[in-house]
Amino acid sequence: ASTAMTRTEDVSVGLYDRPEIANGLSAALFVSCHNNSNDNASPNGTEVHYSVKASEADQGFTSKAIAESVMDELEASMGLLRRGAKNSPAYAVLRCTEMPAIIIEGAFLSNPSDLQYMLSDTYVEDYALGVARGIIKVLNAAVDSQQE
């Protein structure tokens, strides 16, 4: 799979610029990786947001399928509380992309236990592994179904 980054430096990319970049590239999938935060220190865990769009019909996979698969694999690789795959059509990057799209919230910066894990040497690797495995499973299934 080839990838494109909306940013490679610590600079702001506008909320509506992100889906515009992906749409301009005719990307097959949009993945937005984040970490969560809350005013309260108790929320913890991992969640993935998606919004199924009519434009996904010809892709062979949906945002929901990608979100659920990535959520399963993040739970396995990171071992954090499973907050679930959530339908979130109000989010601009999910609503404005033409392709299947997900937003991943890896853990809570505001939760002491999650933050300790995030500062460990394994967090980025565990996060990346879960995301990659989740995406690969759905893309492989889509290819397999097209070959039948």
Image (tube, helix red, strand yellow):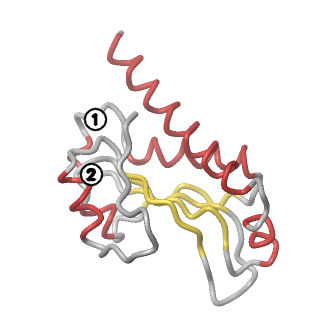
Q: Which residue is mark 2?
A: 53
Residue type of the residue flagged with mark 2: Lys
| Residue in the image at 71% along x and 71% along y | 44
Circle 1 crowding by C-alpha within 10 Å: few under 14, some 14–19, many from 20: some
Residue farthest to the top, as pictured: 148
Find disc 1 in the rendering and name its residue: 59
Q: Position of residue 56 (x, y in %)?
A: 26, 43
* In this rendering, position of residue 28 left or right of residue 50: left
Give residue 24's position: percent from left, percent from top. Answer: 17, 53
Q: Total marks drawn?
A: 2
Q: Quadrant of residue 109?
A: bottom right
Q: Is residue 36 above or below residue 19?
A: below
Q: Answer with left or right where residue 8 lies relative to residue 71.
A: left
Mark 1 and mark 2 in contact? Answer it, CB < 8 Å: no
Q: Residue at point 60% right, 57% down? A: 84
Mark 1 or 2, nearer chain start: 2
Q: CA distance from mark 1 to mark 2?
A: 11 Å
| Local SS, label 1 | loop
The picture quadrant where one finds residue 97 is bottom left
Q: Residues within 10 Å of mark 2 (few under 14, many from 20)?
A: some
Measured as percent of width and height from the top left, residue 70 is found at: 56, 45
- Residue positioned most to the bottom: 39
Q: Give the label on residue 112, or none.
A: none
The image shows residue 148 at horizontal and vertical percentages of 36, 9
The amino acid type found where label 1 is placed reads Gln
Question: What residue is rendered at 72% in x and 44% in y?
Answer: 76
Residue at the image position 76 percent from the left and 69 percent from the top: 114
Question: Is 86 rendered above or below residue 114?
Answer: above
Q: Is residue 55 above or below residue 139?
A: below
